[in-house]
Image (cartoon, helix red, strand yellow):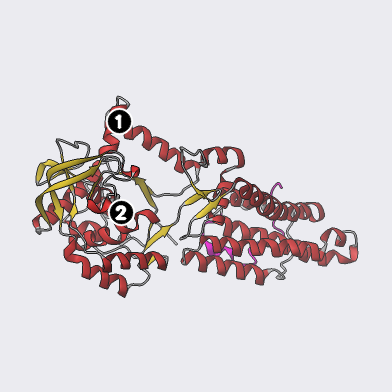
Amino acid sequence: EEVFFLTGLDEHGQKVQQAALAEGKTPQAYCDELAASWKAFAAKLNLTNNDFVRTTEPRHKAVIQAILSKLHANGQFYKAEYKGFYSAKEETFLTEKDRRPDGTFDPMWGEVTELAEENYYFRLSAHQQWLIDYIEANPDFVYPSYRRNEVLGFLKNNRLEDLCISRPAARLSWGIPLPFDPGYVTYVWFDALSNYISVPAALGDPAAAGPLGLGAPASGQPLQSSLWPADAHVIGKDIVKFHAVYWPIMLKAMGAALPRQILAHGWWQKDGAKMSKSLGNVVDPVAVIDEWGVDAFRYYVVRELDLGPDGNWTDAGFQARYSAELANGLGNLVNRSLSMLKRYRGGVTPPRSDELAEAAAKAAAGVVENLRGHRLQGALEDIWALVNRANQYVDQTAPFKLAKDPAQAARLGEVLYNLAETCRVLAVLLTPFLPDSAARIHRQLGLAAPPKHAGEAGWGVLAEGHVIGDV
């Protein structure tokens, strides 16, 4: 299906401002350097994101100020004084509930100071019952189900407090000014969270721009196809509350549709422990890619981490999967299948045979079903079921023995066709996971354009007489 993948960076805030000043840089210059690194990393991972938003971009700022103006005009904000504790490290206000029995705060909060200042608040609490009703009426809104249960438990057992959405510009200048009070900048909620709709709105999507009173972009016509509401927000489990509580209420208040689903993934552990720079148990993806290749990294990440629970990275597990499944499984199948076609038929595809058609169709259907259900790990398991079936087929049919008997020429042709066509089907199914390997298999088969659609996995595309490429 046609998709629009959006990713990017949340660049405002006190921590960013402090880090930039500590390095003797302006916050913008500091963010520009990091943005270049993140974009290069996305390219190294072979990600196919259609857009990359930075919250410091003018297009984002303009949409955020339109959101703030509308909600302020609708009476959704009010000004009040706050007195209490503040964690600069986590950029959040704390209450007595956050204190330990001895009156101190957990070191995770860093230095905690007492603070008294006026700020603007969003009337979050007024929408609490509406959100409970919405999540109960839409059971797939938060996935997996146990994250949904966590959100409902939080909403039913706590009274939502109104949300502080500003910081005085005198204390934090690195942010988007409030259009109705330039003495303040907007805080993370109405800045970072709104990136999901600011890009569609800036691109002129009527469903995103319309509720905010924004027209088509000056640069041209509105998008032909709607980007909003998003089909899925893919987030980490630690920020479920912000995306499944704050964000839906913000959208409701601005009159925009909610995303169809919030997908919360788990965290990576290393050798059964939480990754920590201080412990040194961190996996450097760039180093892994440089040594093993990007497809090997992508494969292990998806194969080991189902969408939902935590995953556990072990170097031994990575090497074992690489050896058993990528090298001996997939690599061995493709190499011997196409090498035999070269050796025994001069690289010319024999007449069609359908012995592995059923197994290929089962794998393709399973992949599509799993992808629609956000089960990437399950999709890879379906693909490898076909890899294993084809390797088993080689052992059962023994084409190298058939090649020695001229009377078995027709049978050898059937076997070679099934293996070559299975390799082609695998290239299609593997494209989202192992794009480099899939493209290489396609080239080895003498096929020009790389696969682009799961529908290309249908059996029988290789025609009799087709000449494969270099193996």
Which amino acid, mark 2?
Answer: Tyr
Q: Residue at x 66, y 69 (%)?
A: 359
Element type at mark 2: helix
Query: Which residue, given by chain and number where applicable, does mark 1 sit on?
Result: 20
Residue 196, disc: 2
Where residue 278 sits in the image (x, y, percent)? 46, 37
Is 25 one of the magenta-colored residues? no
Side of 296 relative to 403 (left or right): left
- Mark 2 neighbour density, 10 Å: few (under 14) some (14–19) many (20 or more): many
Which numbered disc, 1 or 2, marks the residue that appears first in the sequence?
Answer: 1
Where residue 103 sits in the image (x, y, percent)? 26, 46
- Mark 1 neighbour density, 10 Å: few (under 14) some (14–19) many (20 or more): some
Residue 300, disc: none
Q: Determine the image quadrant of residue 431.
A: bottom right
Using the rendered image of the protein, determine whether residue 94 is visible from the camera's viewpoint: yes
Element type at mark 1: helix
**Number of numbered discs overlaid on the protein picture:** 2
Q: Which residues are magenta?
A: 451-471
- In the image, residue 284 sits, relative to residue 250, either above or below, namely above
Where residue 462 sits in the image (x, y, percent)? 66, 61
Label 1–label 2 contact, CB within 8 A: no
Q: Determine the image quadrant of residue 143.
A: bottom left
Using the rendered image of the protein, determine whether residue 224 is visible from the camera's viewpoint: no
Which amino acid, mark 1?
Answer: Ala
Q: Residue at x 51, y 38 (%)?
A: 280
**Viewer-proximal residue among 357 and 24:** 24
Of circles 1 and 2, which is in front? 1
**Label 1, label 2: how far apart the Cα atoms are:** 26 Å
Where residue 64 sits in the image (x, y, percent)? 21, 49
